[in-house]
Amino acid sequence: MEKVLSGKPVSSLLNKAVNKLISEYGINPQMQLIQVGADPASAYYVQSIITNGKKLGCGIDLLQLPVNTTEQELLNCLSAANTNPAIDGIMIQKPLPKHISDSVINNAINPAKDLDCLHPMNLGKIMMEADGFLPCTPAAVYYLMRYYEIDPVGKHVVILGRSNVVGKPMANILLWKRAFANATITVCHSKTSNLADITNSADILISAIGIANYVNANMIKENSVLLDVGINEIEAQDGSTIYTGDINYNDCINKALAITPVPGGIGRVTTAVLYLNLVAACLNHRGLNKTIDEYITLIFNANQ
């Protein structure tokens, strides 16, 4: 296994699968991307979505709303996208401003167009191991693990963060009774006592807490695998803006068996997963449904 787990070859496989599906079925998937405000990490991801979408031949309609947009105004925009037959999938960039309820917005998304698996119906399918969309970031972690043959079966996986977007669905995916799952999961959060004791027991540590360089070498086990979901904007010594993960890369790399970089790791794969979900939504609208396992097979046979 490589020491540095780059997302580049994984995203390349996903992009090849997307290109193959678009070519095979002659489709032109269309996404409604909605951003409220200008959160730095969110803006970074939105730009990546737009750039990669153009390369893949997918249509992206970015609706950029001011931070003072009301909840009802956002619901109205969402309703229009839900009922627009020209839109195959909807992506609402998180986080939303605090005056807008995540729960209200998540419940308002058309489940058939819900590209990041925010609707309770889609999240429930993950828990029940039913076919449907996989949320982009947890799926990115899962596909990267499969690519690098980081098999979680029987391993202790510690997840830092319990969000509905990453932590909870990630835990459920790795609990599945199928290949590259069957892990023993501990989910930690801001109220967890003796956190370092728990992270030191992890064979695989997945960090999604959104605190720059939070995890240091004293918090990890020798030869553990570190998967960093965080993208945090910080100021460098020269005053420039740089992005870093939740895991202190330089402090942990020598102790870890393998580690994902930031940028260039999970985030890069996350963007590619979004387009796989968009293609899946486009095919579903045409009655061409595929199972999760069929998509996994397609991805890892993309080079053939």
Image (cartoon, helix red, strand yellow):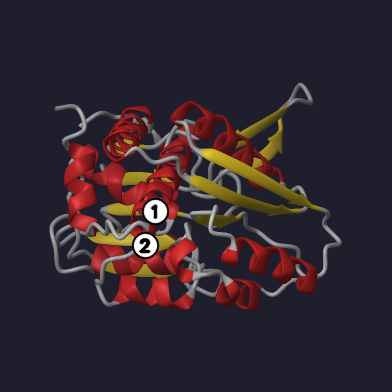
Mark 1, residues whose alpha carbon is within 10 Å: few (<14), some, or many (≥20)?
many
Between 247 and 63, the residue placed more toward the observer is: 63
Seen at 50% across and 35% down, the residue is: 262
Q: Position of residue 88 (x, y in %)?
A: 48, 54
Between 42 and 219, the residue placed more toward the observer is: 42
User: In the current view of this chain or complex, which residue is farthest to the right?
Assistant: 68
Q: CA distance from mark 2 to mark 1?
A: 9 Å
* Residue 12 position by quadrant: top left
Q: Mark 1 — residue?
A: 206
Answer whether residue 255 is visible to the viewer in this image: no
Seen at 83% across and 63% down, the residue is: 69
Asked if labels 1 and 2 touch by Cβ distance under 8 angstroms, the answer is yes
Seen at 59% across and 35% down, the residue is: 50
Question: Taking 260 as reference, is 131 left or right?
Answer: left
Q: Position of residue 302 (x, y in %)?
A: 21, 33
Q: Position of residue 167 (x, y in %)?
A: 44, 64
68 to 280, vertically: above or below: below
* Residue 254 position by quadrant: top left
For numbered disc 2, what is the local secondary structure?
A: helix
Mark 2, residues whose alpha carbon is within 10 Å: few (<14), some, or many (≥20)?
many
- Marks 2, 1: nearer the viewer: 2
Answer whether residue 78 is visible to the viewer in this image: yes
Q: Position of residue 273 (x, y in %)?
A: 40, 45
Q: Amino acid at mark 2?
A: Met
Between 217 and 300, the residue placed more toward the observer is: 300
